[in-house]
Amino acid sequence: MNSYKRIAHFGFYIPILLAIVVFIGCKENSTVSIQSSAHQNIPVVVSTTDVFTYAIDANAYADSTADDLTFSSDSLACTLTVSGYLSGDASLYIRDSTDSIVFYNSITTNETIVITQAGKGIPKRFTLSCNNFTGKISFVLSRIPSAQ
């Protein structure tokens, strides 16, 4: 019985010893920051019948892109957000089927633009031209549902 007490007594210290070993084995928690530019200059585009989204994290980006749109209404909501602007410039155009401008913005600073409009034409083409642009651009164009 005496040996049982020794084992039971030792069993009491096992969790305490494990906790000490774990805490001694822990080092200061440090955050590893991964500074990857792998995602830069790669646009993300989503296009459906009622919504078009374009986003890019640009670093000295110098290129033009154009996407066809499939909207069927000229009742629109438009949001343009530019953040982290450092340098360069960009021009964003939305044109209708007759090449008339539905929306235009010259990008040279951080900004947020929200527009709702109707009657300016059904969007058919998105164009973004960047000239050594560094910053983040997010553009969303969506059809406003008609009230029923």
Image (cartoon, helix red, strand yellow):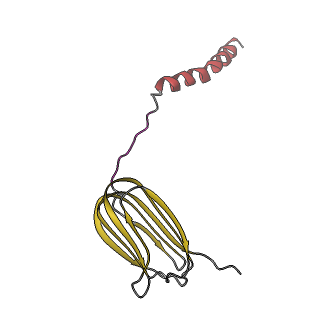
The residue under the point 34% across, 65% down is 90
Look at the image and tell me in which quarter the C terminus lies: bottom right
Q: In which quarter of the image is residue 100?
A: bottom left
Q: Main secondary structure of the magenta part?
A: loop
Name the one closer to the observer, 118 or 61: 118
Reply yes or no: does residue 31 show up in magenta.
yes
Q: How many labels does the image show?
A: 0
Reply yes or no: does residue 24 show up in magenta.
no
Residue 116, how many percent across, how many down? 56, 71
Name the one closer to the observer, 90 or 7: 90
The residue under the point 35% across, 59% down is 108
146 over 84 or under it: above or below: below
Q: Is residue 146 left or right of residue 88?
A: right
Name the one closer to the observer, 45 or 146: 146
Residue 56, how many percent across, how many down? 39, 62
Residue 24, how many percent across, how many down? 48, 22
Q: Residue furthest top?
A: 2
24 over 114 or under it: above or below: above
Q: Is residue 22 left or right of residue 62?
A: right
Look at the image and tell me in which quarter the N terminus lies: top right
Residue 141, how many percent across, how many down? 50, 72
Q: Quadrant of residue 138?
A: bottom left
The residue under the point 47% across, 71% down is 46
Name the one closer to the observer, 51 or 8: 51
Magenta residues?
A: 30-37
Q: Is residue 73 left or right of residue 124?
A: right
61 over 84 or under it: above or below: below
The residue under the point 56% across, 24% down is 18
30 over 146 or under it: above or below: above
